[in-house]
Amino acid sequence: MSNSSGKGSQRRPFALMLAALLAMFVALPLAACNNNANTAGSSSAKQEAASTEATPEEKTTEEPPTEEAKPEEATGEVDIAATFPSWNADSESLHSLIDFVKATTTEGGPDYVAPEDRIATFDMDGTIICEKAPSYIDWCMLNNRVLDNPSYNEPEYTPSEEAIQMCQAIRDAINAGEKPSDEMEHNKAALITSEFAGMTPKEFHTFVKNFATSVNTVGFETMTYAESFYKPMLEVFDYLKANDFDVWMVSACEREVVRALTADLGIPADHIIGTDVVYYATNQGEEPYDKYTQEKGEEILLGNPLGQETAKTGKVIAIMKEIGKRPILAGGNSSGDHAMLNYAVSNPEHKGMSLLVIADDDVREHGDPVATAELFDKCAEQGWTSFSMAKDWATIYGEGVNAVPYPGVEGEELALAA
C-alpha cells in the first residue's frame, strides 16, 4: 500500500505541470489574435480620424495668406504717370534711366550697387534750371543788383559807375542774343564778388531768394526765376532719392548762389559743389587765415575774388576732393560737363550712366533744334543718354509757359525791376 501510494503521489505533480503547459500554449495564440485585432482597430480609428482633417497642402489651398503683395514689389514696374508726370510716357531715354536704376538697386543682380556708392552728380544751369533767361542766372542776378537797384539791395549798397557800365554792356549783349566776350566773362567774374562782398552768407542767400521769387525771367511769360526749374528733372531727382541715390550738385556757378537756389529741392548745403568765393572774418583784414584767430561775435563774410572755376575737368577734380567717390550717374548739358559725364559713364567698378539735356525746343524754350542736332550723335559716340526737351518732355516749366522774344537790344529797358 505504501509503495503504490508513493508512486501515485509522484505522478500528480507531473500531471499538473503538463496541464499548465498545455494551457499556456493555448493562451498565447489567443492573446496574439486579440493584440492584432486591437492594433487593427487602432490603426483603422487613426485613419478614419485622419481622413476628416485637411492635409497641409489642402490647408494652404483652402486658406490663402491674407497679406497682399504690393504691385511694385511683384512686378518691379514704375507708375510713369504718377512718378514722371512731366515726361512723355513712351520716352526711350526715360525708360533707359528707369532700367539703370532697377539694375543698380536690385539686390543679387549683376549690376547691384550698394546705397553708399550710388553717387549722382548734376550740373545746374541748363541741366535743372533755365540758362537762357536770357543768360546764366548769376549774370541776371548781378545785373538786377547793379542796374535795377531793387528794394532788397541790403545791406545798403550803391554801385560804382564802372560797375554800372560793365553790367549794362553785359545786359545789352546777352539781351541781343550775343555770346558774352572773354572781356565780359572776366568782368562778370570780378563783379559777382566785388558787388556782393561784405555780405554774410545768410544775407546773400536772402538776396538770391528775393531775386528769384520777385523777378520774371526774361524771354518767358509769367515765370519767375524761382519757377524756371525744369519740372522733368526735378522728378528725376525725386525718383533717384526715393531709390537711395546720393544726389550732388556740381556747378561752375558760385557755390553760395547754388546753395540759395536749390535749398528747397532737398539737396543739403554740404552736397553743393561750385566755384568758391573768398571768405574772411569781420576783423581779419589782410592777415592770413593761419595767422588770425577769430574772436567771439565775429561773422564770416563773402570776399573777393572768385576761386578756380569748377568747369570741365575742374568738376572731376572737385568731385574727388569733396565726395571722394566716383559717381555712377551724372547729368549735364554743355561742354563744361563732358568731363564729368565721361567720368561717370566709364566707372570701372560699377555700372555707370550719363545724361545730356539737349535744348532743342524752340517753342517752350529758347532752344535751337538745328544747332543741337549734332549733340545726339555726340551722345551715341560717347555712350551718354540724351534728354531731348522737344521729344522727351511733355512740359518743361508747366502748362502755359512758353518762350517769347527777348525784349530788345542796346538802349531798351528790360523789365527786371522788383
Image (cartoon, rainbow, N blue to C red):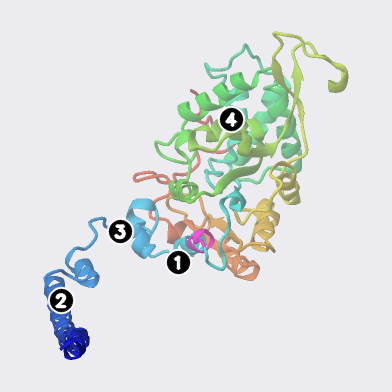
Q: Quadrant of residue 254?
A: top right
Pinpoint residue 407: horizontal percent, then vertical percent: 50, 37
**SS type, badge 3:** loop
Task: Name the residue beneath numbered marker 4.
Answer: 141
Range of residues picked out in magenta: 102-107
In the rendered structure, which amino acid carries the disc numbered 1?
Glu
Closer mark to the observer between disc 3 and disc 2:
2
Question: At 64% from the left edge and 43% from the top edge, which residue is drawn?
Answer: 251
Q: Which mark is residue 47?
A: 2
C-alpha span from label 3 to label 1: 29 Å
C-alpha span from label 4 to label 3: 51 Å
Task: Name the residue beneath numbered marker 3.
Answer: 69
The reply, left or right, for residue 96 in relation to residue 190 is left
In the image, residue 381 lies in the stretch drawn in magenta:
no
Task: Name the residue beneath numbered marker 1.
Answer: 92
Closer mark to the observer between disc 2 and disc 1:
2
